[in-house]
Amino acid sequence: MRGIDVFMDSLALHGVDTMFGNPGTTENPLLDSLIDHPDLKYYVTLHEGVAVGAAGFYAQASGKTGLVNLHVAPGLGNALGMMYGALKSKSPMIVTAGQQDTRMRLREPLLSHDLVAMAAPVTKWSAEPRDADEVSEVMRRAFQIANEEPKGPVFVALPINVMVQETELAAQGSGEYLRAAQAEQKGIAQVVQMLLASSNPAIVVGDDVASTGSSQLMVSLAEETGAQVYHEGLRAQNAFPGKDIHNKGRLPFEAAGIRRVLAPHDLILMTGSPEFEEVWFDQGGLMPDGAKTIQLCSAASRAAFKFPVSLSLLGDLKTSIDSILRHLKTTAGKGYEADSIARNEALAIKHLANVTASEARLKSQWDYQPMTPARAIWEISSAIPEGTIVVDESITASVEIAAGFDFSIPGDYFGGRGGGIGQGIPGALGVKVAHMARPVLCTSGDGSAMYSIQALWTAAHHDLAIVFVIFSNKEYRVLKHNIDIYRNRFGQSSNKPYPHMDLTHPMLGFSEMARGMGLAAESVEDANDLAGAIKRGFDSGKPYLIEVAVSGKQ
């Protein structure tokens, strides 16, 4: 058998039936083999970053290992930004790239480079088989490492001559790999005692709460303790129901802001290894002084990694939360139960007040022209079909997205991590491939959309019925906000204009771009027309783009 046969058999042994890629000459062994493997679906993209973005979100949405095939050094270079996002999102995936014939290595042939070194900084492991005998072991190890906690991308270079070499070493599966290590009962008891001693607990949920199926347990724990629940500024998945009374939204992107929000709490329970990705430097730590802190995580490498905690409890996240909840119910006395009920009642009153205030703000801006993002999102959420998945990269409208949609279960929402933009539209491809039976809505800002707009062609080419909504405010709004913050933080003059942050002269025409790539598309300026456009998009059963004119920075 040839090296490429071992590679393809490795994919089958690990349950891979989907691949995203951008074809190239050194990928010919793989592309040619696809003809003999009709059960492996290949999704063609026009840019390597789109392929990686789609595969990363596919891995998140499907729970499977994503697979990508790229084209040599320039192609891998094109993909590195999206690989960084996949690493931050802990997306289990194998990124491959064709490599030039190793017999020409010293002659530095066209498109060649040290691919292993290029990929290493943004992957968990990076390797290249030296001959066909190594393909089996490299692929087995790649699948294992990609799926070990914390999960993430690995990279494998595939030299064209190695792929056609003969070998007698067949593909190997990874075998049964039991990861659900139980947390120590002593630690469970200690967590419960700290919860019982707390008068105002807070819970911070990370993406792992969603990916491990622990969200409903987390709801029960919040109800049992009367805790307020926060999530990080950036999240890949929805770990906690958005409209639950305990949900207090996202934390800020700087230490002082995080401390300020968490200051009223005497105990902070961090679940699912939240990473607290900061944007701005502040003196001091992330946690408020005097608060006790607990971290539940399944990867020892992330325990107390960024800041000290009072207690780190290692173990399978779902069984840990379940054990804490059961132990708490059997241990809590009537006094604690009464305190929890009082906290829940206070949260319900505050939640209703917040909803009322939000509705009043929306009403006060109802007829603004251009429409506000909040009005646009209200119209969209009222028109989408039941069971719609939202893939969001609206950036400055992300708070309104979180408030405007009822993300009640994991799998209702997907977003990008790491801060690199352009993830949303490719990500929607991967989510749709993972959930063909569910409606998918992709929301994106206009600046973000331009990073990966060619992903629309892939949606049309493969007939992926996604409704893309581009919020067009004709500016990099987030950068305008950030330059205001910069000027304030560093004492710079604040009456200057915003340099190079407007997307005008010429104006971007997203409807025209979409039509040029085979999509039906329309533009909406009047908010009263938006719900009808959304309905037309979903009723079409085809990829469909709606460009929505919204207000910019005020």
Image (spheres, grey):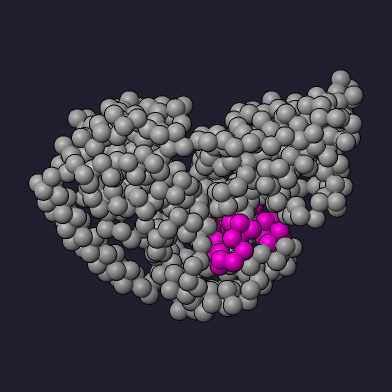
Q: Position of residue 545 (x, y in %)?
A: 61, 68
- Seen in the picture, residue 504 relative to 323 is either above or below; the reply is below
Locate residue 218 relative to residue 515 in the image: left or right: left
The total of numbered circles placed on residues is 0
Q: Position of residue 363 (x, y in %)?
A: 31, 72
Residue 72 makes an appearance in the image: no
Q: Position of residue 467 (x, y in %)?
A: 58, 67
Q: Which residue does the image show at 73% across and 45% down from the upper left?
A: 12
- Give the quadrant of residue 333: top left
Locate residue 427 relative to residue 364 in the image: left or right: right
Q: Report the front residue among 50 and 487.
A: 50
Q: Which residue does the image show at 63% across and 74% down from the upper left?
A: 541
- Seen in the picture, residue 467 relative to 322 is either above or below; the reply is below
Q: Position of residue 484 (x, y in %)?
A: 39, 44
Q: Residue furthest top?
A: 106
Residue 447 lies within the magenta run: yes
Locate residue 478 relative to residue 64 in the image: left or right: left
- Seen in the picture, residue 458 relative to 139 is either above or below; the reply is below
- Magenta stretch: give its range: 431-459
Q: Which residue does the image show at 36% across and 39% down from the upper left?
A: 320
Q: Report the front residue among 58 and 485.
A: 58
Image quarter (top left, top right, bottom left or bottom right) of the N terminus: top right
Q: Report the front residue among 525 and 79.
A: 79
